[in-house]
Image (spheres, rainbow, N blue to C red):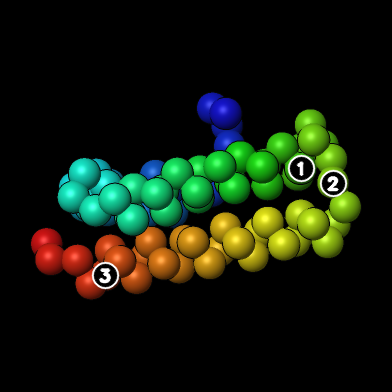
Amino acid sequence: MANTPHTLQEEFPTQLEQIHELKIANAHFAKLLEEYDALNTRVHLAETNVEPMEALAETELRKQRAAIKDEIARMLSTAAV
């Protein structure tokens, strides 16, 4: 999705190089990135009614996305630069 909001590039614009380095060096981090992107796409499809879902389910997806984003942010902040 070209116009999907909340991409990691938007969320962490100053840390793109660090994201790339961690993705290569850390399999768990790479998996988190994939999970985030998949959830973000699902949220966007729900928000735009391409794949509508109940509000509670959409809220749950947003919470999952936020939890993964928090873990990504934590890993970025503790990674050696």
Query: Please, is residue 32 above or below residue 56 in the view?
Result: above
Relative image position of residue 41 (x, y in whole percent) = 61, 40
Identified at 75% across, 61% down, the residue is: 59
Tell me, yes or no, if residue 48 can be seen here: yes
Amino acid of disc 2: Met
Question: Helix or strand or loop: what does disc 2 sit on?
Answer: loop
Badge number at residue 24: none
Choose mark 2 or mark 3, whichever is in front.
Answer: 2
Tell me, yes or no, if residue 13 can be seen here: no
- Horizontal side of residue 53 vs 44, given as left or right: right
Relative image position of residue 58 (x, y in whole percent) = 76, 54
- Horizontal side of residue 10 vs 2, given as left or right: left
> Alpha-carbon neighbours of circle 1 within 10 Å: few (<14), some, or many (≥20)?
some
List the residue tagged with mark 3. 77
Instruction: Compute the Cα span from label 2 to label 3.
Output: 34 Å
Instruction: Compute the Cα span from label 2 to label 1.
Output: 6 Å
Q: The N terminus appears in which quarter of the rendering?
A: top right
Q: Are discs 2 and 1 less than 8 Å apart at CB? A: yes
Amino acid of disc 3: Ser
List the residue tagged with mark 2. 53
Instruction: Compute the Cα span from label 1 to label 3.
Output: 31 Å
Amino acid of disc 1: Ala
